[in-house]
Amino acid sequence: MFGFYDSYFLLFGLRITYYGFIIAMAMALGVFVACKNAKFRNLKSDDILILACYILPLAIIGARIYYVIFSDNSYTFGEIFRIWDGGMAILGGVIGGAIGAVLYCLIHKKNLLDVGDIVAPSLILGQAIGRIGCYFAGCCYGVEVTDPTLQWFPLSTMIGGHWHYSTFFYESIWNFCGFIVLLLLLRKNKVRNSGEVIALYFLIYGAGRAWIEGMRGDSLYIGSLKVSQVLSIILVIIAIAMIVVIEVLQKKGKIKSLHELQSAYSNNLLTELENQKQARLEKKNARLQQREQKKELKKRENLEGEKQTKNDKEKE
């Protein structure tokens, strides 16, 4: 499938798994897209690069810890750190990344809702690409398909000699669609308040994951409940609560709408540009005045020199 028949490829003798390579590319592309979107919440590319230094390491740690906690496998302390042997969970990565975003905002004095709005499209894009890697890793598949008429890709996939629903593929397509929606909402300024894009991410991803997780055949459980399905439903509830609270606070005047914030930002920017223009003009006038003073001083020196020369000749 896709022209690949192994789970890894060799680069200068180094074995690189397709799953790890695809995840790395998803992270890099996510950071790139966030840098391009930063201006829509008055952030800079440098802010996003610093943010990535907080989010990415904690996302990896969170994804691993989540899997280790809820997996049926038992791990020694050393095995916990062997992420190259497999065992990562996307929702754990979301939780870890969220902690990184909060730390970044606290330390660098940034608005968490604005940062969340910029991160949301990149996050769901990374998840869409990352799910492609699940094909090569042979994970995140659905329950077994016994009906021969349904045993064809991409509806189902051969895993371990048996056909299973391609839930990783379903989630990838769902997330790609979610990425397009969130990107358009952000870039076309189709939401009224900061924080609504990240809230819609929780809603879109949570709803899709809750539905698809019900079809999964390799889920992580806590008791008889699928952990990721429960957390996905919680994400949907959080999303709805966030949107309601933000709208209520905006109507009560507790927070400003994006239009008001952008108007204030534009006014501040115009004021700053005007101040910079005035400062440049004053600096230019100061240079001209200094130049005129130097010319006047030189003229006086020349006159005094001529006068001295004339006096010397008269004495002779």
Image: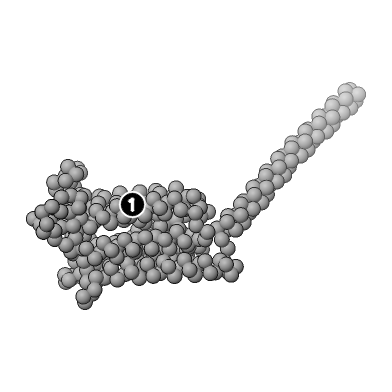
Locate residue 206 relative to residue 160 in the image: left or right: right
Q: Quadrant of the C terminus?
A: top right
Which residue appears at 22% of the width and 71% of the height? 221
Locate residue 274 relative to residue 293 in the image: left or right: left
Which residue is most to the bottom?
223
Q: Is residue 48 above or below residue 112?
A: above
Which kind of residue does numbered mark 1 sit on? Phe
Residue closest to the eye, 245 or 37: 245
Residue 48 placement (x, y as % from top left): 44, 54
Residue closest to the eye, 290 or 20: 20
Which residue appears at 50% of the width and 52% of the height? 189
Residue of label 1: 176
Which residue appears at 24% of the width and 73% of the height? 225
Locate residue 233 relative to residue 132 in the image: left or right: right
Q: Secondary structure at mark 1?
A: helix
Residue 132 placement (x, y as % from top left): 25, 51
Which residue appears at 39% of the width and 48% of the height? 32
Q: How many marks?
A: 1
Q: Is residue 289 above or below residue 93?
A: above
